[in-house]
Image: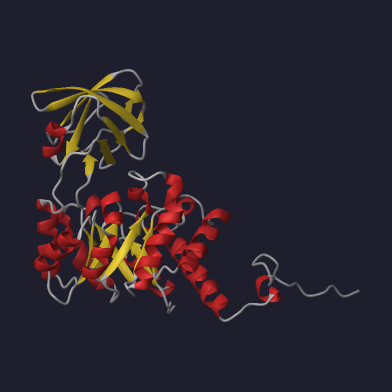
Amino acid sequence: MSLKRALLCTLGPTSLNERVISELEQVGASGFRINMSHTEVADLERILQFVQKCTKVPVSIDTNGARLRTGPMGEGVALVEGTRVRLVSAAFWGDAFTIPISPGTAVAQLEPGARVSIDFDAVLLQIDRIVDGSAEAIVLSGGEVGSRKAVTAYPSPRLSNFSEKDLLATQIALKNGVHEFALSFCEDRASVDRFRGMIGPGDTIVSKIESQQGVRNLGEILKATDRILIDRGDLSREVRIEAIPLLQKAIIHAANARKVPVYVATNLLESMISRRVPTRAEVNDVINTLLDGADGLVLAAETAVGKYPVEAARMIATLMNEYEGSLKGLHLDDLLGDHPLSARRPARTP
């Protein structure tokens, strides 16, 4: 299927096979995305070569970026409110009393009194004291903690835009013919310029707007980048969630004005991770995002770990076509056409 707008599908455990990749291509995927936040550098070359063998659809790399994450955790680890835990930089399996955090340089920068949120406030901690390079914390709000979950600290430690992992992943991707890179947590033009120097002059940079600084410096970023991507999930860690819809509209408007393509990601069809059909609210959100002026949509967990990756991509493609049709003008009868379940049956003979 040929779509006028970009449809990027993130590949992961449920979609990294030849059948699903082929079906996603048929549905209309214009790009496949490898997220380095959930991919080991040691596996990257093998994954790239496998995907390139399965399809001619371009592959892009999403850098890990300046993001705190939990390290490897045991199965079903749950923190209990009121208990104490230790945040450490060592790379070993965590449990209900010790949580490894990467990058390791961040732990020593945490301050007593700082609050630490894990996995979109699934768990909330408050730092009590720093001892021998590790941070002791009290669990303010308990819950489960999994491996590689996003961590947000207030105040935030200073992190480099480019980790050693990102540098290695970029080199491997370039070696294997990848020409599009998403720059995670892009906060200023200098980051775009530096990344441009790391890749080829003809390669594409998609700057991800997912922090307050990225929004504040949007004008300068738009002058240097090839495209931008609004990551509504990570943006909501630093911005009130009720402000995200209005920020989305403002960012898209700014990108449209400068004729810089803009993509939108996060929770587009979140329910389809486990359900075959989306909610009415999700369908409404996708159409309104296109009405805002988005040039592309990005599926993440829906196609990487969801049960229905092809159905999710097909739904986005269908909604894109509905939107394109509306630009030509639709009559009420067009919108009130037959429901998929209302297949006409032959009339009974008397």
Q: Look at the picture and state if 26 lies above or below 124.
A: below
Q: Look at the picture and state if 18 lies above or below 270.
A: below
Q: Look at the picture and state if 56 lies above or below 276.
A: below
> How is the protein colored in the picture?
secondary structure
Residue 218 occupies which quadrant of the picture?
bottom left
x, y (%) of residue 322? Answer: 55, 72
| Residue sitting farthest toward the right | 350
User: Image point 70% across, 75% down: which residue?
Assistant: 333
Q: Is 227 or 32 nearer to us in this picture?
A: 227
Q: Tag count in the figure? A: 0
x, y (%) of residue 133? Answer: 9, 28
Quadrant containing the C terminus is bottom right
Report the side of 239 relative to 127 (left or right). right
Report the side of 208 relative to 337 (left or right). left
Q: Look at the picture and state if 304 lies above or below 237.
A: below
| Residue sitting farthest toward the bottom | 328
x, y (%) of residue 174? Answer: 13, 69
Can residue 299 be seen in the rendering of this structure? yes
Can residue 298 be seen in the rendering of this structure? no
Quadrant containing the N terminus is bottom left
User: Image point 47% across, 63% down: which residue?
Assistant: 289
Residue 16 occupies which quadrant of the picture?
bottom left
Residue 17 occupies which quadrant of the picture?
bottom left
x, y (%) of residue 229? Answer: 32, 62
Q: Is 260 or 218 nearer to us in this picture?
A: 218
User: Image point 53% across, 60% down: which residue?
Assistant: 283
User: Image point 21% across, 62% down: which residue?
Assistant: 47
